[in-house]
Amino acid sequence: MTTFTTLYADLSPRATVRRLFRTRLGRFLTAYLEMTLSMLVGMGLFGAVWDGVWPGLTARPDAMALTMAFDMTVGMAAWMWVRGHAARHIAEMSGVMVLPFLVLLCPYWLGVLAGDALLTWGHVAMFALMAAYLAWRPHTSHTTLPVTRNVQSPRSHAARLSSVLLVGGAVLALAGGILHPHDEPPNSHAAVFAEYAHSTDWVWVHDLQFLSAALVVAGFLVLGRALQRLGAAPTLVRLGDAAAAATVALIAVNMAVDGIALKRAVDAWAAALPEDRAPRFAAAEAVRWLEWGVNSFFTILLGVTLLMFAAALLRQAHLGSRVRLAGVTGALAGGLLIVNGLAVGAHGFEPGALPLVATGLYIVMALGIPALDRSVGAPVPPQSPASRHQPAPR
């Protein structure tokens, strides 16, 4: 009876799939799919960055080839690091991905190869060499340093609470963005002021946006306590707390300027007599420009806050792949927010994909934070002099 039970258990679909993934072919296909998806994510992520920062960067085929190779390589290398691959394997795979484009650039610059052929054959050679490298040197297994658990103290739930606050704040921010009037181009002041003047729920929408920001800042403060419990760098946590406090203060100022002052200014402009409309419009524009400045600085500070806590998470990379992924995505989100804040200060509220991409990365970071609750570190007890000199068991 035991033999038949074991046999049927081994023939179950789940066991069959598990055995397939453990074969060399299964590991190869899994690794190849992971690399391909991470490359596509990197290309999409950094593509949005280049479109916002340097719109004409990819106008030439050689610049496009180098930019795409860089974007895909960074995405793949980041994912390999999250999965725990050795630095040597990451460097080798990165070289394999960039090499085809570097080789094909020479005939392109000499006029022998067309721009379309450069991009086509560069991608074909990159994927082929990547498959050959994975088949020649299978290094799909990843290693993670053992996590020390403190069994003497109850499990902490601070990281889970932080994740709930961070995700809840992001959801409220998205809801506030949807409810906020957004039909007109934000930098077309005459049209957008008329749209704002007709809004009847303007104030409470901005109250909702401030509540979302307060939840996010509270989530970061709770995350700081969870990181301190794990022995994270105190300086990083303090800097993150200070940046979070400054961020919520600037967000309060921004909501006061946008949610109250701007609304009163556009209402006065819309209701003014024809001879008074020009000075009223100028006053509303001045308030709008003040909003640009405050929004720019609070977005930059929010990015700095993310970078501080992401750096603290990366210092805890030995706690597992979820923590490493949270650190990487948090750092990317922080960088994108800083870039977006600089863009707002320079050009105003131009439509772009950077805020949405940063929000997606930030949510991925928040969903990885609960792994900290299962990794409460315990100090290693000091060994006695006698035990240090005892021979290791064979």
Image (cartoon, helix red, strand yellow):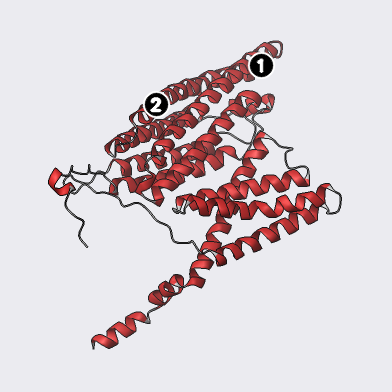
- Horizontal side of 177 relative to 156 (left or right) equals right
The residue positioned 61% from the left and 65% from the top of the image is 132
Could you tell me which secondary element the residue under label 1 belongs to?
helix
Q: In this view, does 53 lie to the left or right of 367?
A: right
Residue 54 is left or right of residue 33, and the answer is right
The residue that mark 2 highlights is 239
Number of numbered labels in the structure image: 2
- What secondary structure is marked by label 2? helix
- At x 52%, y 28%, the residue is 299
Q: Is residue 353 visible?
A: yes
Q: Nearer the viewer, mark 1 or mark 2?
A: 2
- Give neighbour class at mark 1: few <14, some 14-19, many 20+ (Cα, 10 Å): many
Q: Measured from the top left, where is residue 250 in percent x and y?
A: 46, 22
The answer to which of marks 1 and 2 sits earlier in the sequence is: 2
Neighbours of disc 2 within 10 Å: few (<14), some (14-19), many (20+): some
Residue 93 drawn above or below residue 260: below
Give the residue pinned by disc 1: 281
Residue ID at (55%, 53%): 38
Q: Who is closer to the viewer here, 298 or 198?
A: 298
Residue 43 seen in this snapshot: no
Q: Nearer the viewer, residue 357 or 108?
A: 108
State the quadrant of the N terminus.
Answer: bottom left
Where residue 29 appears, as percent x and y from the top left, is 53, 67
Q: Report the quarter where the C terminus lies.
A: bottom left
The alpha-carbon separation of the residues under discs 1 and 2 comes to 41 Å
Query: Is 247 situated above or below 63?
Result: above
Q: In this view, does 125 lie to the left or right of 137?
A: right
Question: Hey, which quadrant is residue 225 in on the image?
Answer: top left
Give, as a three-letter code, the residue at label 1: Phe
Q: Which mark is residue 75?
A: none
**Near-viewer residue (233 or 212):** 233
Q: What residue type is labelled 2?
A: Leu
